[in-house]
Image (spheres, rainbow, N blue to C red):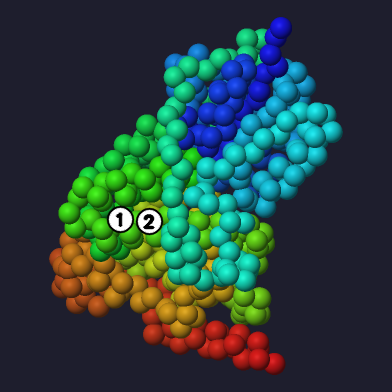
Amino acid sequence: MSVSPIVVWFRSDLRLASNRALSAAVATGAPLILTYILDDETPAAWKRGAASRWWLDKSLAALSASLETRGATLIFRRGVTGEELPRLVTQSKASAVYFTRCYEPHAVALEDQLKAVFDSAGVVFKRFGGNLLREPEDVRTKTGDVYKVYTPFWKALSADFTPPKPLPPPKAITAFKSALESDNLAAWRLHPSKPDWSGGFGEHWKPGEDGAHEKLQTFLEAAMRSYADDRNRPDRPGTSRLSPHLHFGEISPAQCWIAAQHAAASMPGADKGCETFLKEIVWREFSYTLLYYWPDLPEQPFRRDFAAFPWKSEPAHLAAWQKGMTGYPVVDAGMRELWHTGYMHNRVRMIVASFLIKHLLIPWQAGEAWFWDTLVDADLASNAASWQWVAGSGADAAPYFRIFNPVTQGEKFDPDGTYVRRWVPELTALPNDVIHAPWTAGALTLAAAGVTLGKTYPHPLVDHAAARARALSAYDAVKMASKK
Protein backbone atom coordinates (compact mmCIF):
# COMPACT_ATOMS: atom_id res chain seq x y z
CA MET A 1 0.00 0.00 0.00
CA SER A 2 1.51 3.31 -1.08
CA VAL A 3 1.94 6.14 1.41
CA SER A 4 0.77 9.60 0.42
CA PRO A 5 3.60 12.11 0.09
CA ILE A 6 4.16 15.17 2.25
CA VAL A 7 5.08 18.53 0.76
CA VAL A 8 7.79 20.41 2.66
CA TRP A 9 7.38 24.06 1.73
CA PHE A 10 10.63 26.00 2.18
CA ARG A 11 10.35 29.74 2.80
CA SER A 12 12.73 31.64 5.09
CA ASP A 13 14.19 28.42 6.50
CA LEU A 14 16.74 27.44 3.87
CA ARG A 15 18.62 24.92 6.01
CA LEU A 16 18.58 21.23 6.85
CA ALA A 17 19.80 21.28 10.47
CA SER A 18 17.35 22.40 13.17
CA ASN A 19 14.59 22.65 10.62
CA ARG A 20 11.62 21.36 12.59
CA ALA A 21 9.28 21.11 9.62
CA LEU A 22 11.77 19.08 7.59
CA SER A 23 12.77 16.84 10.51
CA ALA A 24 9.13 16.12 11.38
CA ALA A 25 8.34 15.28 7.77
CA VAL A 26 11.34 12.95 7.48
CA ALA A 27 10.33 11.23 10.73
CA THR A 28 6.97 10.19 9.26
CA GLY A 29 8.72 7.94 6.75
CA ALA A 30 6.50 9.29 3.99
CA PRO A 31 7.98 10.25 0.63
CA LEU A 32 8.70 13.96 0.54
CA ILE A 33 8.23 16.67 -2.05
CA LEU A 34 10.52 19.60 -1.27
CA THR A 35 9.63 22.91 -2.86
CA TYR A 36 10.41 26.60 -2.97
CA ILE A 37 7.95 28.99 -4.62
CA LEU A 38 9.16 32.35 -5.88
CA ASP A 39 6.17 34.63 -5.37
CA ASP A 40 6.49 38.28 -6.35
CA GLU A 41 2.74 38.92 -6.28
CA THR A 42 1.67 38.10 -2.73
CA PRO A 43 4.19 40.40 -0.96
CA ALA A 44 3.16 43.26 -3.29
CA ALA A 45 5.40 46.27 -2.55
CA TRP A 46 7.57 44.12 -0.29
CA LYS A 47 8.68 41.52 -2.79
CA ARG A 48 12.38 40.78 -2.42
CA GLY A 49 14.71 43.58 -3.42
CA ALA A 50 17.50 43.23 -5.94
CA ALA A 51 20.36 42.46 -3.54
CA SER A 52 18.19 40.02 -1.59
CA ARG A 53 17.35 38.19 -4.81
CA TRP A 54 21.06 37.74 -5.49
CA TRP A 55 21.42 36.05 -2.11
CA LEU A 56 18.31 33.95 -2.66
CA ASP A 57 19.76 32.60 -5.91
CA LYS A 58 22.93 31.42 -4.18
CA SER A 59 21.17 30.13 -1.09
CA LEU A 60 18.67 28.07 -3.06
CA ALA A 61 21.50 26.60 -5.12
CA ALA A 62 23.30 25.59 -1.93
CA LEU A 63 20.15 24.09 -0.42
CA SER A 64 19.39 22.19 -3.63
CA ALA A 65 22.89 20.72 -3.69
CA SER A 66 22.64 19.64 -0.04
CA LEU A 67 19.31 17.93 -0.68
CA GLU A 68 20.66 16.09 -3.71
CA THR A 69 23.38 14.50 -1.60
CA ARG A 70 20.57 13.05 0.51
CA GLY A 71 18.60 11.67 -2.40
CA ALA A 72 16.10 14.49 -2.82
CA THR A 73 15.39 17.22 -5.36
CA LEU A 74 14.20 20.74 -4.68
CA ILE A 75 11.21 21.62 -6.85
CA PHE A 76 11.24 25.22 -8.05
CA ARG A 77 7.94 26.88 -8.84
CA ARG A 78 7.18 30.50 -9.65
CA GLY A 79 3.83 32.21 -9.25
CA VAL A 80 1.21 33.09 -6.68
CA THR A 81 1.76 30.75 -3.75
CA GLY A 82 -1.97 30.57 -3.02
CA GLU A 83 -2.34 28.94 -6.43
CA GLU A 84 0.96 27.11 -6.91
CA LEU A 85 1.07 25.25 -3.59
CA PRO A 86 -2.47 23.79 -3.89
CA ARG A 87 -1.66 22.88 -7.51
CA LEU A 88 1.43 20.98 -6.38
CA VAL A 89 -0.57 19.17 -3.70
CA THR A 90 -3.23 18.20 -6.24
CA GLN A 91 -0.68 17.02 -8.80
CA SER A 92 1.14 14.82 -6.27
CA LYS A 93 -1.92 13.77 -4.27
CA ALA A 94 -0.03 14.84 -1.14
CA SER A 95 -1.78 14.36 2.18
CA ALA A 96 0.03 17.11 4.09
CA VAL A 97 2.06 20.28 3.84
CA TYR A 98 4.72 20.98 6.47
CA PHE A 99 6.26 24.45 6.72
CA THR A 100 7.97 26.96 8.99
CA ARG A 101 5.98 29.92 10.22
CA CYS A 102 6.66 33.46 8.96
CA TYR A 103 5.48 36.75 10.45
CA GLU A 104 5.32 39.39 7.73
CA PRO A 105 1.75 40.66 7.18
CA HIS A 106 1.44 39.11 3.73
CA ALA A 107 2.86 35.82 5.04
CA VAL A 108 0.41 35.70 7.94
CA ALA A 109 -2.52 36.33 5.58
CA LEU A 110 -1.23 33.68 3.18
CA GLU A 111 -1.00 31.05 5.91
CA ASP A 112 -4.59 31.76 6.95
CA GLN A 113 -5.75 31.55 3.34
CA LEU A 114 -3.97 28.27 2.69
CA LYS A 115 -5.20 26.72 5.92
CA ALA A 116 -8.78 27.29 4.83
CA VAL A 117 -8.07 25.81 1.39
CA PHE A 118 -6.33 22.71 2.69
CA ASP A 119 -8.73 22.15 5.59
CA SER A 120 -11.61 22.02 3.14
CA ALA A 121 -9.65 19.53 0.99
CA GLY A 122 -8.72 17.30 3.93
CA VAL A 123 -5.03 18.07 3.58
CA VAL A 124 -3.00 18.50 6.78
CA PHE A 125 -1.44 21.97 6.90
CA LYS A 126 1.14 21.76 9.69
CA ARG A 127 3.04 24.81 10.92
CA PHE A 128 6.32 24.77 12.85
CA GLY A 129 8.38 27.41 14.62
CA GLY A 130 12.09 28.01 14.27
CA ASN A 131 12.55 31.40 12.65
CA LEU A 132 12.34 33.06 16.08
CA LEU A 133 13.44 32.04 19.56
CA ARG A 134 9.90 32.35 20.87
CA GLU A 135 6.60 32.99 19.17
CA PRO A 136 5.15 36.54 19.40
CA GLU A 137 2.17 35.29 21.39
CA ASP A 138 4.44 33.78 24.04
CA VAL A 139 6.22 36.92 25.27
CA ARG A 140 3.74 39.20 27.05
CA THR A 141 3.68 41.55 30.02
CA LYS A 142 2.18 40.41 33.30
CA THR A 143 -1.08 42.05 32.24
CA GLY A 144 -1.05 40.23 28.92
CA ASP A 145 -0.06 43.22 26.79
CA VAL A 146 2.49 43.30 23.99
CA TYR A 147 5.87 44.74 24.93
CA LYS A 148 6.57 48.11 23.33
CA VAL A 149 9.91 48.72 25.05
CA TYR A 150 12.94 46.60 24.25
CA THR A 151 14.66 46.23 27.65
CA PRO A 152 11.66 44.67 29.45
CA PHE A 153 11.13 42.48 26.39
CA TRP A 154 14.74 41.26 26.60
CA LYS A 155 14.41 40.53 30.30
CA ALA A 156 11.14 38.67 29.87
CA LEU A 157 12.37 36.56 26.97
CA SER A 158 15.81 35.73 28.37
CA ALA A 159 14.80 35.16 32.02
CA ASP A 160 13.47 31.64 31.55
CA PHE A 161 14.51 30.88 28.00
CA THR A 162 15.92 27.46 27.22
CA PRO A 163 16.68 27.01 23.54
CA PRO A 164 15.29 23.89 21.90
CA LYS A 165 17.64 20.98 21.46
CA PRO A 166 19.45 21.24 18.09
CA LEU A 167 18.25 18.86 15.40
CA PRO A 168 20.84 17.26 13.11
CA PRO A 169 20.31 17.43 9.37
CA PRO A 170 18.65 14.32 7.98
CA LYS A 171 21.15 11.77 6.71
CA ALA A 172 18.83 10.64 3.95
CA ILE A 173 15.47 11.74 2.59
CA THR A 174 12.87 9.48 1.03
CA ALA A 175 11.90 11.44 -2.04
CA PHE A 176 8.64 11.25 -3.99
CA LYS A 177 9.46 9.31 -7.14
CA SER A 178 6.89 10.57 -9.63
CA ALA A 179 8.08 13.34 -11.94
CA LEU A 180 6.90 16.84 -11.09
CA GLU A 181 7.49 19.94 -13.16
CA SER A 182 10.14 22.29 -11.85
CA ASP A 183 11.60 25.55 -13.06
CA ASN A 184 15.31 25.93 -13.66
CA LEU A 185 16.75 28.18 -10.97
CA ALA A 186 19.08 29.93 -13.41
CA ALA A 187 16.10 30.84 -15.58
CA TRP A 188 14.74 32.99 -12.76
CA ARG A 189 17.59 35.48 -13.40
CA LEU A 190 17.69 36.66 -9.82
CA HIS A 191 20.79 38.83 -10.16
CA PRO A 192 20.21 42.61 -10.25
CA SER A 193 19.95 44.21 -13.67
CA LYS A 194 19.96 47.71 -15.13
CA PRO A 195 22.49 47.99 -13.55
CA ASP A 196 23.87 44.78 -12.08
CA TRP A 197 25.92 46.01 -9.16
CA SER A 198 26.27 42.58 -7.54
CA GLY A 199 29.59 41.71 -9.14
CA GLY A 200 31.52 42.24 -5.91
CA PHE A 201 29.08 40.53 -3.57
CA GLY A 202 30.72 37.13 -3.92
CA GLU A 203 33.99 38.49 -2.53
CA HIS A 204 32.29 39.16 0.79
CA TRP A 205 29.66 36.44 1.16
CA LYS A 206 29.08 32.72 0.99
CA PRO A 207 25.30 32.23 1.00
CA GLY A 208 23.97 28.91 2.23
CA GLU A 209 23.94 26.82 5.39
CA ASP A 210 27.66 26.01 5.28
CA GLY A 211 28.51 29.69 4.87
CA ALA A 212 26.29 30.56 7.83
CA HIS A 213 28.06 28.16 10.16
CA GLU A 214 31.47 29.27 8.94
CA LYS A 215 30.51 32.89 9.63
CA LEU A 216 29.25 32.00 13.11
CA GLN A 217 32.41 30.06 13.95
CA THR A 218 34.64 32.90 12.77
CA PHE A 219 32.72 35.35 14.92
CA LEU A 220 32.85 33.16 18.04
CA GLU A 221 36.57 32.57 17.71
CA ALA A 222 37.74 35.99 16.56
CA ALA A 223 35.26 38.65 17.61
CA MET A 224 32.81 37.66 20.33
CA ARG A 225 35.11 38.43 23.25
CA SER A 226 35.43 42.08 22.16
CA TYR A 227 32.01 42.36 20.55
CA ALA A 228 30.52 44.72 23.13
CA ASP A 229 33.03 47.41 22.11
CA ASP A 230 34.12 46.52 18.60
CA ARG A 231 30.60 46.16 17.19
CA ASN A 232 30.54 49.97 16.95
CA ARG A 233 33.81 50.15 14.99
CA PRO A 234 33.33 49.93 11.21
CA ASP A 235 37.11 49.98 10.82
CA ARG A 236 37.39 46.60 12.57
CA PRO A 237 35.98 43.13 11.84
CA GLY A 238 34.05 43.25 15.09
CA THR A 239 30.55 42.13 14.10
CA SER A 240 29.07 38.73 13.32
CA ARG A 241 27.73 39.57 9.83
CA LEU A 242 25.17 36.83 10.39
CA SER A 243 22.13 38.95 9.52
CA PRO A 244 21.60 37.70 5.94
CA HIS A 245 22.10 34.10 7.04
CA LEU A 246 19.49 34.59 9.77
CA HIS A 247 17.10 36.33 7.43
CA PHE A 248 17.13 33.48 4.94
CA GLY A 249 17.00 30.90 7.69
CA GLU A 250 20.31 29.30 6.76
CA ILE A 251 20.91 29.24 10.50
CA SER A 252 18.36 29.70 13.26
CA PRO A 253 18.54 32.18 16.14
CA ALA A 254 18.43 29.23 18.55
CA GLN A 255 21.51 27.70 16.92
CA CYS A 256 23.33 31.03 17.32
CA TRP A 257 22.20 31.33 20.93
CA ILE A 258 23.41 27.85 21.87
CA ALA A 259 26.73 28.22 20.07
CA ALA A 260 27.45 31.62 21.67
CA GLN A 261 26.70 30.42 25.18
CA HIS A 262 28.77 27.28 24.68
CA ALA A 263 31.72 29.29 23.35
CA ALA A 264 31.50 31.86 26.16
CA ALA A 265 31.57 29.10 28.78
CA SER A 266 35.06 28.11 27.67
CA MET A 267 36.36 31.56 26.76
CA PRO A 268 37.54 33.76 29.65
CA GLY A 269 36.35 37.34 29.37
CA ALA A 270 33.68 36.59 26.77
CA ASP A 271 30.58 36.92 28.95
CA LYS A 272 29.95 40.58 28.16
CA GLY A 273 30.43 40.10 24.44
CA CYS A 274 28.19 37.04 24.48
CA GLU A 275 25.37 38.86 26.28
CA THR A 276 25.60 41.81 23.89
CA PHE A 277 25.39 39.42 20.93
CA LEU A 278 22.35 37.68 22.41
CA LYS A 279 20.71 41.06 22.95
CA GLU A 280 21.15 41.80 19.25
CA ILE A 281 19.42 38.53 18.42
CA VAL A 282 16.57 39.54 20.73
CA TRP A 283 16.36 43.00 19.09
CA ARG A 284 15.54 41.11 15.90
CA GLU A 285 12.94 39.19 17.89
CA PHE A 286 11.48 42.44 19.26
CA SER A 287 11.25 43.85 15.73
CA TYR A 288 9.25 40.83 14.56
CA THR A 289 6.90 41.16 17.51
CA LEU A 290 6.24 44.78 16.58
CA LEU A 291 5.64 43.86 12.94
CA TYR A 292 3.33 40.99 13.86
CA TYR A 293 1.07 43.14 16.05
CA TRP A 294 1.44 46.37 14.05
CA PRO A 295 1.45 45.12 10.44
CA ASP A 296 1.55 48.64 8.98
CA LEU A 297 4.93 49.27 10.66
CA PRO A 298 6.80 49.40 7.31
CA GLU A 299 4.53 52.16 5.99
CA GLN A 300 3.11 54.15 8.90
CA PRO A 301 4.74 55.73 11.96
CA PHE A 302 4.22 53.66 15.08
CA ARG A 303 3.65 56.92 16.94
CA ARG A 304 0.75 58.34 14.99
CA ASP A 305 1.57 61.96 15.85
CA PHE A 306 4.58 61.67 13.54
CA ALA A 307 2.22 61.47 10.56
CA ALA A 308 2.20 65.27 10.73
CA PHE A 309 5.98 65.62 10.45
CA PRO A 310 6.92 68.35 7.92
CA TRP A 311 9.07 66.28 5.58
CA LYS A 312 10.90 67.80 2.62
CA SER A 313 10.83 66.57 -0.97
CA GLU A 314 14.42 66.87 -2.20
CA PRO A 315 15.07 64.33 -5.00
CA ALA A 316 18.58 65.68 -5.59
CA HIS A 317 19.48 65.26 -1.91
CA LEU A 318 18.04 61.74 -1.85
CA ALA A 319 20.06 60.82 -4.96
CA ALA A 320 23.26 62.24 -3.44
CA TRP A 321 22.66 60.20 -0.29
CA GLN A 322 22.03 57.02 -2.30
CA LYS A 323 25.23 57.51 -4.31
CA GLY A 324 27.42 58.33 -1.30
CA MET A 325 28.01 61.90 -2.41
CA THR A 326 26.74 63.93 0.56
CA GLY A 327 30.08 65.52 1.41
CA TYR A 328 30.16 63.82 4.82
CA PRO A 329 32.80 61.05 4.53
CA VAL A 330 31.43 58.52 7.02
CA VAL A 331 27.96 58.80 5.47
CA ASP A 332 29.37 58.40 1.98
CA ALA A 333 31.56 55.48 3.04
CA GLY A 334 28.52 53.66 4.38
CA MET A 335 26.43 54.20 1.29
CA ARG A 336 29.25 53.05 -0.98
CA GLU A 337 29.92 49.98 1.17
CA LEU A 338 26.23 49.17 0.76
CA TRP A 339 26.37 49.49 -3.02
CA HIS A 340 29.51 47.41 -3.41
CA THR A 341 28.83 44.65 -0.88
CA GLY A 342 25.06 44.60 -0.25
CA TYR A 343 25.77 45.33 3.40
CA MET A 344 26.50 48.19 5.76
CA HIS A 345 28.00 48.17 9.24
CA ASN A 346 25.27 48.60 11.87
CA ARG A 347 26.73 51.71 13.53
CA VAL A 348 27.03 53.33 10.11
CA ARG A 349 23.43 52.35 9.31
CA MET A 350 22.35 54.50 12.23
CA ILE A 351 24.56 57.39 11.09
CA VAL A 352 23.34 57.38 7.49
CA ALA A 353 19.71 56.96 8.56
CA SER A 354 19.96 59.85 11.01
CA PHE A 355 21.54 61.99 8.28
CA LEU A 356 18.77 61.27 5.77
CA ILE A 357 15.97 61.84 8.25
CA LYS A 358 17.29 64.62 10.44
CA HIS A 359 19.80 66.49 8.29
CA LEU A 360 17.86 66.27 5.03
CA LEU A 361 14.31 65.87 6.44
CA ILE A 362 13.61 63.14 3.88
CA PRO A 363 10.98 60.62 5.04
CA TRP A 364 12.32 57.49 6.69
CA GLN A 365 10.25 55.41 4.26
CA ALA A 366 12.54 56.56 1.41
CA GLY A 367 15.60 55.25 3.24
CA GLU A 368 13.78 52.07 4.21
CA ALA A 369 12.91 51.44 0.54
CA TRP A 370 16.52 51.98 -0.56
CA PHE A 371 17.81 49.58 2.07
CA TRP A 372 15.14 47.07 1.07
CA ASP A 373 16.47 47.02 -2.48
CA THR A 374 20.21 47.14 -1.77
CA LEU A 375 20.76 45.09 1.40
CA VAL A 376 21.40 41.35 1.14
CA ASP A 377 19.98 41.10 4.68
CA ALA A 378 16.86 43.16 3.85
CA ASP A 379 14.43 42.08 6.55
CA LEU A 380 11.00 43.69 6.75
CA ALA A 381 10.75 43.65 10.53
CA SER A 382 14.27 44.81 11.35
CA ASN A 383 14.35 47.35 8.53
CA ALA A 384 11.06 48.99 9.51
CA ALA A 385 11.65 48.93 13.26
CA SER A 386 15.19 50.28 12.96
CA TRP A 387 14.32 53.12 10.59
CA GLN A 388 11.49 54.15 12.87
CA TRP A 389 13.80 53.90 15.87
CA VAL A 390 16.18 56.40 14.29
CA ALA A 391 13.32 58.65 13.19
CA GLY A 392 11.94 58.81 16.71
CA SER A 393 8.55 57.59 15.49
CA GLY A 394 8.87 53.95 16.51
CA ALA A 395 8.41 51.84 19.60
CA ASP A 396 11.09 52.51 22.22
CA ALA A 397 12.59 54.94 19.71
CA ALA A 398 15.65 57.12 20.05
CA PRO A 399 14.73 60.56 21.42
CA TYR A 400 13.85 62.96 18.62
CA PHE A 401 16.57 65.34 19.76
CA ARG A 402 19.25 62.66 19.30
CA ILE A 403 20.78 63.90 16.06
CA PHE A 404 24.06 62.27 15.15
CA ASN A 405 26.83 64.63 14.15
CA PRO A 406 28.42 62.70 11.26
CA VAL A 407 31.80 64.30 11.85
CA THR A 408 32.07 63.39 15.54
CA GLN A 409 30.56 59.96 14.87
CA GLY A 410 33.28 59.34 12.30
CA GLU A 411 36.01 60.61 14.60
CA LYS A 412 34.77 58.43 17.46
CA PHE A 413 34.17 55.16 15.65
CA ASP A 414 36.65 55.44 12.76
CA PRO A 415 39.40 57.44 14.48
CA ASP A 416 42.14 56.64 11.98
CA GLY A 417 39.90 57.05 8.94
CA THR A 418 40.43 53.42 7.93
CA TYR A 419 36.79 52.84 7.01
CA VAL A 420 36.47 56.11 5.11
CA ARG A 421 39.67 55.52 3.16
CA ARG A 422 38.49 52.07 2.13
CA TRP A 423 35.19 53.24 0.65
CA VAL A 424 35.94 56.87 -0.27
CA PRO A 425 39.33 56.44 -1.92
CA GLU A 426 39.45 60.01 -3.25
CA LEU A 427 40.10 61.11 0.35
CA THR A 428 42.84 58.54 1.03
CA ALA A 429 45.69 61.03 1.29
CA LEU A 430 43.99 63.40 3.73
CA PRO A 431 45.47 63.41 7.25
CA ASN A 432 43.47 61.89 10.08
CA ASP A 433 42.54 65.19 11.68
CA VAL A 434 40.49 66.29 8.66
CA ILE A 435 39.51 62.97 7.06
CA HIS A 436 35.99 63.25 8.49
CA ALA A 437 35.59 66.94 7.65
CA PRO A 438 37.60 67.71 4.52
CA TRP A 439 36.05 71.19 4.17
CA THR A 440 37.94 72.22 7.29
CA ALA A 441 41.31 71.41 5.72
CA GLY A 442 43.50 74.19 4.47
CA ALA A 443 44.11 74.76 0.77
CA LEU A 444 47.63 73.35 0.92
CA THR A 445 46.45 70.21 2.75
CA LEU A 446 43.72 69.62 0.18
CA ALA A 447 46.09 70.20 -2.70
CA ALA A 448 48.68 67.84 -1.27
CA ALA A 449 46.01 65.15 -0.93
CA GLY A 450 44.73 65.71 -4.47
CA VAL A 451 41.30 66.80 -3.22
CA THR A 452 39.36 69.58 -4.90
CA LEU A 453 36.09 70.19 -3.09
CA GLY A 454 33.22 70.46 -5.50
CA LYS A 455 35.11 68.47 -8.15
CA THR A 456 36.87 65.36 -6.80
CA TYR A 457 34.68 65.29 -3.68
CA PRO A 458 31.50 67.25 -2.97
CA HIS A 459 30.96 70.07 -0.54
CA PRO A 460 28.61 69.09 2.33
CA LEU A 461 24.97 69.03 1.21
CA VAL A 462 23.96 70.86 4.38
CA ASP A 463 25.63 72.52 7.32
CA HIS A 464 25.35 70.32 10.39
CA ALA A 465 24.45 73.07 12.86
CA ALA A 466 21.81 74.57 10.59
CA ALA A 467 20.36 71.16 9.73
CA ARG A 468 20.21 70.20 13.39
CA ALA A 469 18.34 73.39 14.26
CA ARG A 470 15.90 72.81 11.40
CA ALA A 471 15.26 69.23 12.49
CA LEU A 472 14.65 70.22 16.11
CA SER A 473 12.19 72.87 14.93
CA ALA A 474 10.34 70.27 12.86
CA TYR A 475 10.17 67.84 15.75
CA ASP A 476 8.97 70.59 18.08
CA ALA A 477 6.18 71.37 15.63
CA VAL A 478 5.05 67.74 15.77
CA LYS A 479 5.17 67.79 19.55
CA MET A 480 3.11 70.96 19.72
CA ALA A 481 0.58 69.64 17.20
CA SER A 482 0.07 66.49 19.25
CA LYS A 483 -0.93 68.57 22.25
CA LYS A 484 -3.74 70.39 20.42
Left or right of 103? Residue 456 is left
Q: Which mark is residue 274?
A: 1
Q: Locate residue 183: give its quadrant.
A: top right
Q: Secondary structure at mark 2?
A: helix
Which residue bears the numbered disc 2? 278
As helix, strand or loop, the secondary structure at mark 1 comes to helix
Q: Are marks 2 and 1 in contact (CB under 8 Å)?
A: yes
388 or 160: nearer the eye? 160
Location of residue 439 in the rendering, given as x and y in whole percent from the top left corner: 28, 75
Amino acid carrying mark 1 in the image: Cys
Q: Residue at x 67, y 52 (%)?
A: 105
> As displayed, is residue 115 above or below residue 137?
above
- Measuring 80% from the left and 34% from the top, which residue is drawn there? 119
8 left or right of 88? left
Amino acid type of disc 2?
Leu
Distance from Cα at disc 2 to Cα at disc 1? 6 Å
Please tell me in which quadrant of the rendered image residue 24 appears: top right
- Which label was assigned to residue 298? none
Percent from the top left, x then y, of residue 67? 49, 21
